[in-house]
Image (cartoon, helix red, strand yellow):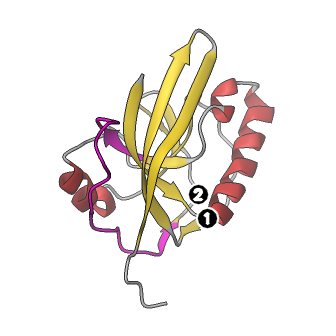
Amino acid sequence: MESYYILRLGKDLRTKLMKLRTQLFEISGKGSFCCLEPCIILGPCDCSSTLPFVPCPRLPITIDGTLRYEEGQLFLPLDPTILSDIRTALGTEYPISGIHLGTDHVSVPSESFTIRSVSLAVLTVERREDLTLWNVLSERHLDSDREN
């Protein structure tokens, strides 16, 4: 079983991104777009540890909607510096900076998205043959002290 620190997105944004992932699934027929909820993977962690207090990235964050495929993952990219403080505080790294969508390379026209709310969470992932099981073990809302 693998465990990761993630930034879990607000419910409204997750719903919009699930629609995008459904579109990607309909085009490709690949199940990777149905495996995990869209989230920002910060890096591996020990799932038995408690969630630390960490700095929130400055919100809101606007994403232009251009899909990128790297390291075997399709994602909506973010500027890596946006996540550097929180990754440093957690002592973790991950090869991509963006919202994870799936593991297959598909291209669709998309819209821009705005991240207004995030929570730090621990995601566990277990893969068994063609089945992926995932669970969010704990979650802590992060406050960005935004002005709007």
Kindly identify which numbered label has been placed on residue 82.
Answer: none
Q: Percent position (x, y) of residue 115?
A: 52, 67
* Mark 1 residue type: Ser
Q: What distance separates the C-alpha of mark 1 from that of mark 2?
A: 4 Å
Q: Percent position (x, y) of residue 86?
A: 27, 58
Is residue 119 positioned above or below 96 on the image? Answer: below
Name the foreground residue: 59 vs 118: 118
Which residue position holds label 1? 112
Magenta stretch holds residue 54: yes
How many tags in the picture? 2
Pick the quarter of the image with the N terminus: top left
Main SS class of the magenta portion in the image: loop
Residue depicted at 64% across the width and 56% down the height: 14
Residue depicted at 45% across the width and 49% down the height: 138
**Are the residues flagged by discs 1 and 2 in contact, CB closer than 8 Å?**
yes
Query: In the image, is 30 to the left or to the right of 61?
Result: right
Is residue 42 positioned above or below 133 on the image? Answer: below
Helix or strand or loop: what does disc 2 sit on?
loop
Helix or strand or loop: what does disc 1 sit on?
loop
Q: Percent position (x, y) of residue 147?
A: 43, 90
Is residue 31 positioned above or below 16 on the image? Answer: above
Q: If you read the primary sequence from the N terminus, does the residue marked by circle 1 or circle 2 appear first?
A: 2
Q: Residue furthest bottom?
A: 147
Magenta part of the chain: 41-62
Name the foreground residue: 84 vs 125: 125
Q: Percent position (x, y) of residue 85?
A: 23, 61
Kindly identify which numbered label has been placed on residue 65.
Answer: 2
Magenta stretch holds residue 55: yes
Query: In the image, is 144 to the left or to the right of 117?
Result: left
Snapshot quadrant of residue 35: top right
Snapshot quadrant of residue 15: bottom right
* Mark 2 residue type: Gly
